[in-house]
Image: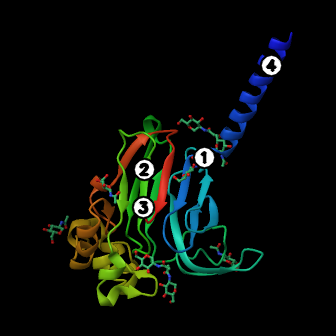
Amino acid sequence: MAIIMKTNLSIFLLIAITSIAAAQAGRFNITNKCNYTVWAAAFPGGGMKLNTGESWNMNITNGTSNARIWGRTNCTFDNSGLGKCQTGDCNGTLECKTIGTPPNTIMEFALNMYNDLDFYDVSLVQGFNIPIQLKPSLNSCGTVNCTADINGECPTPLKVPGGCNNPCTTFDTTEYCCNSDSARSAATNASATCGPTTYSKFFKDRCPYAYSYPKDDATSTFSCMGGTTYDVVFCP
Ligand SMILES: *[C@@H]1O[C@H](CO)[C@@H](O)[C@H](O)[C@H]1NC(C)=O
Ligand SMILES: *[C@@H]1O[C@H](CO)[C@@H](O)[C@H](O)[C@H]1NC(C)=O
Ligand SMILES: *[C@@H]1O[C@H](CO)[C@@H](O)[C@H](O)[C@H]1NC(C)=O
Ligand SMILES: *[C@@H]1O[C@H](CO)[C@@H](O)[C@H](O)[C@H]1NC(C)=O
Ligand SMILES: *[C@@H]1O[C@H](CO)[C@@H](O)[C@H](O)[C@H]1NC(C)=O
Ligand SMILES: *[C@@H]1O[C@H](CO)[C@@H](O)[C@H](O)[C@H]1NC(C)=O
Ligand SMILES: *[C@@H]1O[C@H](CO)[C@@H](O)[C@H](O)[C@H]1NC(C)=O
Ligand SMILES: *[C@@H]1O[C@H](CO)[C@@H](O)[C@H](O)[C@H]1NC(C)=O
């Protein structure tokens, strides 16, 4: 009798512990290893202040395309979660309901797409603010990152407080943006109007796995089995 009770208790504890672990598990575990505070942001998904060493475990709904995760710096928010950030600000809210303003280094996702694959990449199309890395839990899927000292080496015209702008943001021309109003009519000949530039090469040389301009080659995109969990690290 005593043994049966003990067994039942163990099973109960095991179930309890397992449910706690499941409740905390998310597909994205976002960790700040920078020696400054980063306000993590996800769209869709919200946002969370992360002091050095802290993590945010979150999910992005299966089937979401055009999802993104990024970090914001030098933010101030009031108790109701309103304020602003020097980089990556999402319309002044702690919990993002829009994408962020440049410059910000971005992890892009499309989850559970055809063949139930997740697609992901790191994009510098909105410039760079902090180093970032994404590592899938499956070792067979590629790690993507951009960890170079882009702010330190940023070309002067692209430098802004807290980051390094993409030339599209700074110059807003057809050549750099590929999709500006003036480019729309020319966009059918993307190869003529939108190739790599000296500025996009500045980013590509330092972060070869990242999208450096809007029509950058598809080798920057990676895929992994749907349902995979991902570790995102700021300053890996
Ligand atoms: C993430 O989704 C899983 C599976 O649906 C769920 O068990 C878990 O509680 C969710 N985690 C968070 C942090 O929302
Ligand atoms: C998230 O990552 C941090 C840092 O690697 C780790 O300490 C933590 O246990 C992870 N959390 C989960 C729920 O996996
Ligand atoms: C953060 O790290 C950088 C680079 O390692 C260093 O130059 C800087 O002094 C550090 N800042 C703080 C506040 O520790
Ligand atoms: C931005 O915030 C303002 C309120 O401060 C709101 O009226 C507006 O709809 C928001 N814009 C977006 C795109 O969410
Ligand atoms: C960045 O990713 C590449 C390719 O997966 C990997 O070889 C490299 O070690 C990573 N860099 C860092 C700093 O983790
Ligand atoms: C925050 O702003 C201060 C003052 O502009 C700057 O010195 C510092 O580098 C910024 N921190 C980050 C993480 O960008
Ligand atoms: C696109 O531009 C290239 C380079 O200027 C040119 O050689 C090509 O003929 C153009 N293609 C079309 C369809 O206009
Ligand atoms: C999301 O999809 C994965 C497989 O692609 C599945 O394992 C997981 O249970 C799904 N989660 C939800 C909440 O539907």
Q: Quadrant of residue 73?
A: bottom right
In this rendering, which labeled residue sits more in front, label 2 or label 3? 3
Q: Is mark 3 within 8 Å of ligand 5?
A: yes
Q: Residue at x 71, y 40 (%)?
A: 20
Q: Which residue is mark 3?
A: 236
Describe the element under mark 2 as helix, strand or loop: strand
Going by the numbered disc 3, the residue's amino acid type is Pro
Query: Is 126 above or below relative to 2?
Result: below
Going by the numbered disc 1, the residue's amino acid type is Gly
Viewer-side residue, 126 vs 55: 55
Query: Is 11 above or below relative to 41?
Result: above
Query: Is 120 above or below relative to 77?
Result: above
In this rendering, which labeled residue sits more in front, label 1 or label 3? 3
Q: Label 1 crowding class (10 Å Cα cut-off): few <14, some 14-19, many 20+?
A: some
Q: Which residue is mark 1?
A: 26
Q: Position of residue 192 (x, y in %)?
A: 20, 71
Q: Label 4 crowding class (10 Å Cα cut-off): few <14, some 14-19, many 20+?
A: few
Q: Is mark 4 within 8 Å of ligand 1?
A: no
Q: Position of residue 56 (x, y in %)?
A: 61, 57
Describe residue 81's horizontal placement relative to residue 195 as left or right: right
Describe the element under mark 3 as helix, strand or loop: loop
Q: CA distance from mark 1 to mark 3?
A: 20 Å
Q: Which residue is mark 4?
A: 6
Going by the numbered disc 4, the residue's amino acid type is Lys
Q: Is mark 1 within 8 Å of ligand 1?
A: yes
Nearest to N terminus: mark 1 or mark 3:
1
Q: Residue at x 84, y 16 (%)?
A: 5
